[in-house]
Amino acid sequence: MSRRTTIAALVLAGAGAIVVMVGALGTAGDVGGLVAIVLGTVIAAPAARGASGGWWNLLASGAVLSAVGAVVSLANEGAGGLLALIGGVAVLVGVALGWP
């Protein structure tokens, strides 16, 4: 995987996490941010091969927590928002650690 593709995937995931955490764009922004997180995580997966790929586990965990937070927020907005926030922070830390 090229360095440029890895950077683009990490920027996509990071931007999605920021959109979800800020929440200023409404439901459509949250859905778009969640899609960006998942796409960025999937695209960055090949770059995580090898001994230094632990950052991707954090990125993927954050993506899963963000998705679970979106589902939980349908029943309990407070708990879902907290899960989405924790997931967004995990995504941003994974992006920072995975930056080439």
Image: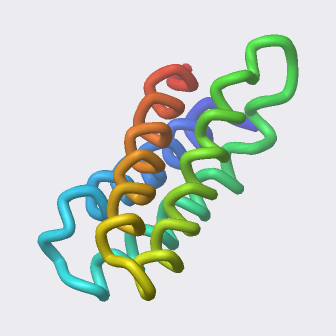
Q: Is residue 6 above or below residue 35?
A: above
Check the image and report above or below for 75 versus 36.
below
Picture residue at 50% right of the left edge, 60% below the top: 66
Residue closest to the eye, 27 or 72: 72
The N terminus lies in which quarter of the figure?
Answer: top right
Q: x, y percentage for residue 98? A: 57, 25
Q: Is residue 97 left or right of residue 92?
A: right
- Total numbered labels placed on residues in the image: 0
What residue lies at 49% left-to-right and 76% top-to-bottom?
Answer: 72
Determine the residue located farthest toward the right in the rendered image. 50
Residue lying furthest left: 24
Residue drawn at 30 percent across, 87 percent down: 28
Q: 7 above or below 78?
A: above
The foreground one among 80 and 97 is 80
Give the quarter of the figure containing the C terminus: top right
Q: Using the image as rendered, state which of residue 93 and residue 87 is in the foreground.
A: 87
Which color scheme did the rendering employ for the protein?
rainbow
In the displayed structure, does residue 34 sit left or right of residue 29?
A: right
Residue 18 is situated, as x and y percent measured from the top left of the image, at: 28, 52
Residue at (84%, 12%) from the top-left corner?
51
- Left or right side of 43 for 23: left
Expressed as whole percent of the image width and height from the top left, the position of residue 3 reads 61, 30
Q: 29 or 61, which lies in front?
A: 61
71 shown above or below 63: below
The image position of residue 26, as x and y in percent, is 20, 83
